[in-house]
Image: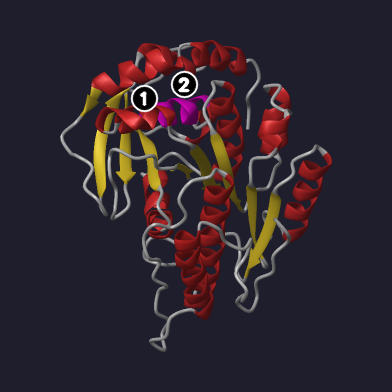
Amino acid sequence: MRVGRIWAQIRAIAKRSLALLFVVACSTSVGAELRPGTSAEFKAELPDELRTLAGRGQLSPVTHALVTIAVPANFEAGREWPVLVVNAYFAGAHLNRGLLHAYSETALAAGWIAIAADPAPEVPREQDEVPLRYALDKAALGALEAVWPRARKAPLAFGGFSAGAMYSGWLAAAFAKEGRNIIGMYLAGIPQNTVLDAARELNLLNEPYRRVPIFLQSGETDEIATMADHRRLQDELRRAGFQNVRIEYFPGPHTTPSASGAGLVCGDRDAVRAIAVRFTRVTTLRAGLPVCPTRIRAPRGPNGLRSPLLRTCSGEIRAASRSGSAPCAPRRKAAGTRRASC
């Protein structure tokens, strides 16, 4: 993943962040509205400044961002909501928005807004780099602000799989540098420590940033980003002073469940969702936000029963919502999953 001098441009753009968000918001095609419990599609035009950034000094052929925004069933525009920004391993074939749909059930049930953006027109893989992802996510946040003005100050978390997790490490740092409140990173199958690389590059090794909760997720049979790779990454982050790094494993290879669950058997999918439940809970608790205002329903397996782990998680989260506090992790865990301390 090449970055180089692009950070000088990102720093310059960060100084004009609010102005650019306003431009993107004004250029967003608002043909839909945010309806509780649903997702909406938007088309946001990229300003020339973002196109030049995405094209590394030349005007990128990408003219628009195709944005999906999903909101919880109890969404109210007048209150604060955390926002999960999703990135897939490749910004083509609508994969970013596809991964959003895979994550959205858990995120929305836990009281999060989820957003993702894909380029229009599509780009070849060699042009899919950090600057393009930054421009797309900037456009996605601008589109969200066009229909929900409180998005300008909403707390952000970044999540993704494989190269999307690597991009998320860079993007969290870039948006933190421009003053956004970063409350978490959900990094699944991440083969390289971009969190530390980006923090060093942008001089973000400060106490607030090192307190951001970081969840690492690894498949037990992953041969691309192995369990050992994730343990090494966790050790590197802890040695650098990151205080809330957590690694969890699930039975499976280097893959993530699609919206339909293809690619993982039901038990594995439940384990992945349970890890995501814990991520949303820990990050919202540490950010001082309401915990899981809606009920989480575990998916049924082939035998018609719901996952015991997810039933336990959802019950504990609902109890936490009433009491205002919650334990760091559920009391029960599924076979094949292990957790480290928060």
Across the whole image, how many numbered discs are drawn on residues?
Answer: 2
How dense is the environment of label 2, judged by Cα within 10 Å: few (below 14), some, or many (20 and up)? Answer: many
Q: Pointer 1: residues within 10 angstroms few (<14), some, or many (20+)? A: many
**Colour logic:** secondary structure
Q: Which residue is mark 2?
A: 54
Q: Gap in Å between the C-alphas at discs 1 and 2?
A: 8 Å
Q: Which residue is mark 1?
A: 62
Name the residue at the right extreme: 239
Q: Residue at x 25, y 32 (%)?
A: 147
Cβ atoms under marks 1 and 2 closer than 8 Å: yes
Q: Which residues are magenta?
A: 131-139
Residue in front for this viewpoint, 89 or 199 = 199
Q: For residue 275, which numbered disc appears in the image?
A: none
User: What residue is rendered at 40% in x and 66% in y?
Assistant: 296
Q: Is residue 86 above or below residue 295?
A: above
30 to the left or right of 65: left
Q: Indicate the position of residue 261 as horizontal and vertical percent values.
A: 42, 67
Is 56 placed left or right of 34 in the picture? right
